[in-house]
Amino acid sequence: FTHDDARMVLVLCIGDMHIPHRVADLPPKFRSLLVPGKIQHVLCTGDVCVKETYDYLRSLCADVHAVRGNYDGDFAAGWPDAKTVKIGDFKFGLTHGHRVVPHGDVNALAAAQRAMNVDVLVSGTCRRWGAHKVEDRLIVNPGSATGAFVSEDPDANPSFVLIDVDGSRATCYVYELCGEEVKVEKVEYSKA
């Protein structure tokens, strides 16, 4: 991906990596896409598990916001369960999502989004990506960047979301590794 327009801001939404407990590393094809100097903000939904993975995210850009997942180690003890971040015209809410029940339920996530009073909610826990427009707001789940195995969803593909914030428009690019091919889907959202 490229970033040429000074008005546009790229936000990486990533999480549920489970490195090294369930998988050794990010897929090489994702590592080749995620390079320093292209991304202005990282929103991490937690479950990075070890400090080295968090340090990798910090190598991509200095502005990393993370929430604590249920598998994060002692290094993340001070991370909040949820937080809000203002980026451009948007107020982003960030949560791991393990306290939103049922997990991945759009109505439950919409309730959490209303409680946080945010335009875009970025939530993890579910291993499959999703982007839903609900009540003139956007809910994004970047999925698992490594495709880390969980018994509830053994066939989930690795994925992350890159959001291009340009004024009152946010364009989500979902990167999903299907076999050896990286597929990209686009979801557009405009703030009312």
Image: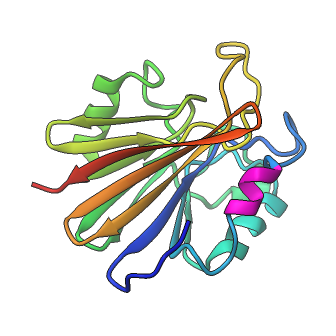
Which residue is at the front of the view, 128 or 52? Answer: 128
Q: Is residue 104 above or below residue 95?
A: above
> Going 25% across and 50% down the picture, which residue do you hit?
189
- Total numbered circles: 0
Residue 172 in picture, x, y percent from top left: 40, 51
In this rendering, position of residue 111 left or right of residue 8: left
> Going 84% across and 62% down the picture, which residue do you hit?
52
**Dividing the image into 4 quarters, which one contains the C terminus?**
bottom left
> Going 37% across and 86% down the picture, which residue do you hit?
6
Q: Is residue 98 above or below residue 139?
A: above
- Decide whether the magenta segment is chiefly helix, strand or loop: helix
Residue occupying the far front of the picture? 181
Query: For residue 30: magenta?
Result: yes
Query: For residue 58: magenta?
Result: no
Residue extent of the magenta highlight: 28-33
Q: Is residue 117 visible?
A: no
Q: Quadrant of residue 56?
A: bottom right
**Dividing the image into 4 quarters, which one contains the N terminus?**
bottom right
Which residue is at the front of the view, 160 or 176? Answer: 176
> Going 68% across and 64% down the picture, which residue do you hit?
34
